[in-house]
Structure formats: structure tokens, C-alpha cells
Amino acid sequence: MLTTLLVALLSQTPAQTGANDAALIIGIHDYPFVEQVPGAKENAREWYLHLTGKVGIPASRVFALYDREATAENIIEQAKRAAGAVQQGGRLWLVYVGHGAPLVRTVDGKLLEPEPGLIGVDAQQTASSLEARSVPLPKLLEVLNAGPQRETVAIIDACFSGKTPHGSSLAPGLQPLLALRSKAVARVVQLSAGSSDQFAGPLPGYDRPAFSFLALGALKGWGDKNADGVVTAREVIDYTNRVMAVAITNRNQRPELQGEDVQLAASLGEAGPTDQEFVERATSQQSAGSVSTTVTADRSSGRRTAGWVLVGAGAAIAAAAGITGVVALGTATRSRTPTTPQTQVVPLFEQAKTLATLADLGYLTAGVSAVAGVVLVLLSPSSQVAVNALLGEVSGGSLVVRF
């Protein structure tokens, strides 16, 4: 294997070693207005280090946008710079890790076929904002293809179903979407995290977007199935599919290849984790999640119990305050009775005032206790679920499309 690797490395042309290449790398973890994508920026940075350090692309020709830098305008601007920086016959890399969404366009009132969009960091949680603040993937590829590269390799770790990890819509009002039809683009080799109707999510046990993490590992040698020292596009897709099939049990995600099965890079010879190691980490995370859920449930139960105790205590205090108030009223009445000796009038009146004050304090304490108890009960997760269900019933009268 060592001889094969040396031959593969020595036979590389300058373009294959990255000397003439350029890259656009986008990683968006911290979306201020829509759900975050944990690990997206970390994956993107590791791709930057790999392309500059191992593939050999000059850092001056690698354009990276992380988090708040990745607005729709900046993505297009940096794509133009990347297309202008790539050398004749080189390769232009596109790495995107973040949210995707279906973009619906109309021309003269006619609804066009939906197209995949890469969501900019500043998109608001509305359908109109997602569409306005996203970059259509076909447009981005068109901008990149203006360069003199022999091909563009696009690593797209995003889904275009418009869904969150919990199955809800990224924004109310997003149009229902049938699976987008895959369209081959000249000089583009596109490796995608999954089909358009699938959710592209994290790799269990790693807290990283699965596809871009595994695809980079495949380039390092994890996916060099035939051990020939070179990793192809098909080997990357086959490797990511195999690992996801054994490590991911809560969703169906099948990475796809569009375009030719080109050689992507010389393998670094890394073996990578075994399938069993992926499974063990996933299982360990699931077990930890179960423990966390149990602890949360116990805390929730204790919170509800404390809440009801406070409500009960408030009721008891209120009852005691009521009795005290009745006694105070009776004492005040006695102080005004003509038969009461003058020597007892003032003491009885002072006693009535004291009892009345105690009654007022009791009512105040009872109110605070009851309110605190009700708040604790309402803040328990089980109560929140009931409230959410009620709100769902209330909003059921309006048309809310979820897919």
C-alpha cells in the first residue's frame, strides 16, 4: 500500500495537488433567528485546514465565511472572488455547512419549480425572509462556473426539506415541497448530504453535521475502499452512506453524487474509526440522553410537587388570615359596645388593629405563596406540553403548512 500511495502522490499534476485550485468555504452554526447548526463552523474550519494544509491550495485563494460573515451578499461576492482566483485547469472547491430551504419563485404570477437555497445567516424566521436572504444553489454554481477551472467540486451539507431536527418547519408559511429533481450541471461534481426530502443532521456521538464530517474523513483515507492511495467522489459517497446506515437510527439520510466520479485527493492513509466505534459512540450518546431525560423528569416532578405545596400553603395561610380577620372584626365591635367598660375600650381597639394587621399580612403571604406555586407548576415540562397542545388546537383554525 505504501508503494501505491507514493506512486499516486508522485504522479499528481500541479492541479491535482491543489497548486492551481481555489475554494469557497461557508460554515454557519450561529443563526440568530432560525435554529442553529451545531458543529457547522468547526467542520468548515477543518475543511479549510485540510484544503490549505494537505491538498495544498494557497491560503490566498481560499475564501472562508463563518457565522455572521455568511450573508447572502457576502456568499455571492466571495464566490466571484473564488472564480477569479482559480487557475486555468485547476479545481474550484465549494464547501457549505448550514441550513438549506426550498425556494419558490414566481414570474408574472406564475409559480416556478422550487429550487434549493442556501440560507444566509441573517435570514429571519419567515418564509419571505428565508427566500429573500438565501442564495439559490444553481445561481451560486453558475457564479463559480465563470472561472477557468476544469471542474467545480461542491460539498453541500444542508437539507432542502425546510425542516428542523424536530420535524417542524424552519419558518411558518414555507411552501410544501416535493423532492427537488436532481439536475446535473456541466463541470460540477456535487456531493450532497442527502436527497431533498431528507433531513441532513448530526452524527450521533460527535455533535457535528454528519456528511461534511464523514466526507472529510473519507478524503483523509477513511473512505479509500480499494486502498489505491486515491479517494474518488464515489468512494466518499459510499463511505458516508455506509457509516450513516450503521450509526444513525432516528432518520433516513442517504448522501448523493451528481456528476462524474472524479479523483478528489490523494489519501493520507488514515484508517479512521471502525463501524463498531461509530455505533458505540452513538449508543453512548443515546444512553446519556436517556439519563438526562430521566433527571429532567425527576426535576420536573419535584418542581410540580413544590408548586402544589406552595399553593396549598397559600390556601391554609389565607384561611388562617380569614379567621384572624373575623376575630379582629369581632374585637373592634366589642370595643364600640356601650356595655364595654371604658377601661377596656382602648385595649380592645388596639388588639383589633393588631389582629387586622396580621390578617392583612396573612392575605399577602397567601397570595405570594399561591402565585409562586402556580408559576412552578406551569413551568414544569409536562404543563408546557399541555399548553403547547392547547395553542396548537387554537391555531388549528388557520392554515399552517408543515411538511
Image (cartoon, rainbow, N blue to C red):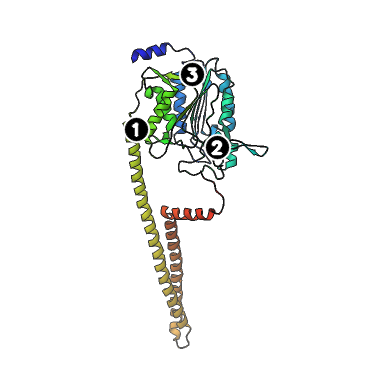
Q: Which numbered tag is attached to residue 278?
A: 1
Above or below, 382 against 315 in this view is: above
User: In percent of the image, x 44 and y 86: which residue is there?
Assistant: 341
Quarter of the image with the N terminus is top left
**Helix, strand or loop under label 3:** loop
Indicate the secondary structure of the residue bearing disc 2: strand
Viewer-side label of 2, 1: 2
Q: Which residue is mark 2?
A: 102
Q: Choose mark 3 or mark 2, whichever is in front.
A: 2
Q: Is residue 119 left or right of residue 304?
A: right
Of the pair 376 and 369, the residue shown nearer to us: 376
Badge 2 crowding class, 10 Å Cα cut-off, few under 14, some 14 to 19, many 20 or more, is many
Callouts 3 and 2 close, C-beta under 8 Å: no
* Mark 3–mark 2 distance (CA, rounded to whole Å): 32 Å
Residue positioned 43% across, 83% down in the render: 344
Q: Give the Cα separation between the discs numbered 2 and 1.
A: 31 Å
Could you say which is closer to the camera, residue 370 or residue 222?
222
Q: 380 or 118: which is nearer to us?
A: 118
Q: Nearer the viewer, mark 1 or mark 3?
A: 1
Q: Quadrant of residue 277?
A: top left
